[in-house]
Image (cartoon, rainbow, N blue to C red):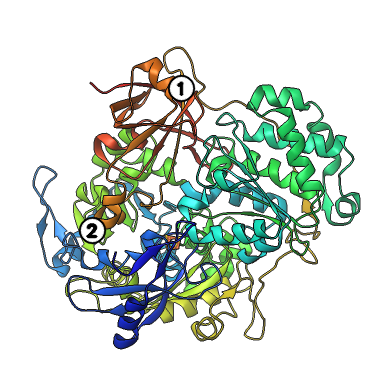
Amino acid sequence: MSHSCNTADGTLKPSARTLDQVSLTGATPTHCPYCALQCGMHVAAATGDSPAIVTAREFPTNRGRLCQKGWTAGELLASPERLTTPLARRSRQLPLEPVTWDEALDRVAEGLQHVRRTHGDDAVAVFGGGGLTNEKAYALGKFARVVLGTSNIDYNGRFCMSSAAAALNRAFGVDRGLPFPLTDLREADTVLVVGGNPAETMPPLVQHLSAQRDKGGALIVVDPRLTATARQASLHLQPTPGTDLALALGLLHLVIARGHVDTAYVDGRTSGFDAVRPSVASYWPQRVERITGVPVGQLEEVVRLLTTAERAVIVTARGPEQQSKGTDTVTAFLNLALALGLPGRPGSGFGCLTGQGNGQGGREHGQKADQLPGYRRIDDPAARAHVADVWGVDPDTLPGPGRSAYELLDSLGESTGPKALLVFGSNPAVSAPSAGRVDDRLAALDLLVVSDVVLSETACRADVVLPAAQWAEEDGTITNLEGRVLRRRRALTPPPGVRTDLETLAALSDRLSDDAHITGDPRATFDELRRASAGGIADYAGISWERIDAEDGVFWPCPSDDHPGTPRMFTDAFATPDGRARFVPVEHRPVAEDVDEDFPTYLTTGRVLAHYQSGAQTRRVRALVDAEPEMFIEIHPDLAAHVGLGDGDRARVVSRRGSTEGTARLTRAIRADTVFMPFHWSGRQRANNVTNAALDPVSKMPEFKVCAVRVEPAG
Ligand code: SF4
């Protein structure tokens, strides 16, 4: 791009020319449409090919930097593939054709009513996305519970953060990804990143890690791959996929054995340590080395770096979380952090790097199967009464907990499952595990409705497609990985024929209900959300759009107008009934599907710098496609030689669930027993053709990070 140049850490900085253009045309301060870092940017209307010029702006998380995805975010606004009219088909055999909004909405409303009359309210399901604004997530939850009366609502964010959320709730009584500002990382003497690769997924974050190391700090990275982040680490641990839990237990074993437990902190601020101490007794270093492949010397070095640090931070990401034991794995690292006395101590702490743009806010306001706004539990009578009062309905009419994301997808069209599905801002046909099974279930629906900005792979399968406004075309709020509530601002007018999701929900609500339950106005929706969240765990009552504008973001909880917000949590007490953080004993267990003779190699999946999630947006941006045009398979040269593959060959990866193809990329950065694939592509390049939908029993997170595969030439 002419307006940018590369910096050493992979982020991009603006050129003066672009800033001049922006100052000439006027610019709106807002945030990136993609990941949870929610970098601050300006968007200005422009002429020519692109309808918008994007420039970085100073904001604490990105400090004037953007990654390539952020810089090119304006291009999708003018994509020729943009949907600008509703589409519908008369039968699955016929193509989608343009229809009017009234025809489309009538068709959806009649279809939903028919399914409800025939099969009951729970036969209609709603699937949301981790990129929806707080207002949309809130309205979607209300629409499902009040207008449709269904318990079946969940969202793609379940695939992002749910294991960390479950573990944080268990330990702290609250789930806020980072309970401290991201910039605290700069001050830590030691940072331990478990299963995260921000150098590719959130490049502007790396400047904080660089600053930390420039001050003499140590960075430890745990990852089966020598990632771009791991290359910058002082110490890289490369465990066998699926063994992070044993690694954490082994580290705590050593902390106890070497006498490094912060007993004053454990006695004064926690409960349950006596049950955890014996539970790690059998994880002596040599045994942990056998399980994980991490040498004893490295285990000792991690403990030395953590225990000699005055300030230390431990963060987890998708690596330990996207496992069938993800909740216990995060819990094991939480136990380690608590034994060291880190959470709630200035400059130290424990957190999780949320991935999806509004993964945090999306799970706080009722888009998740088991939750009501304010991070309230839907099975809590007091929570139901409070929210029902705001909604003006009888609490007894609210449904109970519904199916989790994969369970919901897996049940579509089955005898006891939903027969109609509404999808907003999500592309589960690419993002869900065991995707062949999901294809079958989507095809078995009586009615599939998708609201999106482009014809995603899920929209291609739909009976009705509704064109949605994009990030720079509507107002709303999002909550970033720090729990900081931010403003997305409307910088451009949506193209004719396009509506916001709120307007669509309001129009459907009008058709399906006698009472106007949903408004298309985002500010009114946010004000209602504030009342619905008041008194809840994620309390937004004191957060107004005006305050966000004035303070460039407000951290929840913020229960009143005069409350300053809460950048740092747990300084005095945790959010548990007794104010103490909870140790929880956990045991290592094998992965759901281990390697064997037929499928002798581990597969792990993840993201690359140029693409975001299912790629529905980024695969339509020219510069990003040029940067990473197709799926690839990272494979160690020894394994490649063994299976007869050379660098650049077409390779096939086969599991018990299906196969996928990509270009073999030979590298010694990956373990010889493991291959890596990004999951941004579809069709024959869909990584989720082979992944395993084994679910964590607590969080219902699928095991994206490890399954057994066979690698072979594609012929
Ligand atoms: S994708 Fe994430 S890291 Fe990149 S510019 Fe957007 S918010 Fe920042």
The residue where tag 2 is placed is: 454
Q: Is residue 249 visible?
A: yes
- Left or right: where does residue 40 sit relative to residue 482? left
Q: Please name the residue shown 25% across and 47% down the image.
A: 457
Could you tell me the amino acid type at mark 1? Thr
Question: Would residue 176 be seen by someone viewing this image from the given angle?
Answer: no
Q: Is residue 334 above or below residue 560?
A: above
Is 543 placed above or below 580 here?
Answer: below
Foreground residue among 195 and 212: 212
Q: Earlier in the sequence, mark 2 or mark 1?
A: 2
Looking at the picture, how far across and down is residue 355, in whole percent? 49, 54
**Mark 2 element type:** loop
Image: 231 above or below 690: below
Quadrant containing ligand 1: bottom left
- Identify the residue shown where x is 10% and y is 51%: 90
Task: Quickly name the residue at label 1.
Answer: 601
Q: Is residue 121 left or right of residue 477?
A: left
Count neighbours of disc 1 (C-alpha within 10 A) and say few if under 14, some if 14 to 19, many if 20 or more.
many
The residue at 65%/35% (across/down) is: 245
Q: Quadrant of the N terminus?
A: bottom left
Category of crowding for the residue at label 2, using alpha-carbon neighbours closer than 10 angstroms: few (below 14), some (14–19), many (at least 20): many
Task: Give the amino acid type for the residue marked by disc 2 in the picture.
Answer: Val
Which of these two is toward me, 524 or 361? Answer: 361
Q: Tell me where residue 369 appears, x and y as whole percent.
A: 48, 52
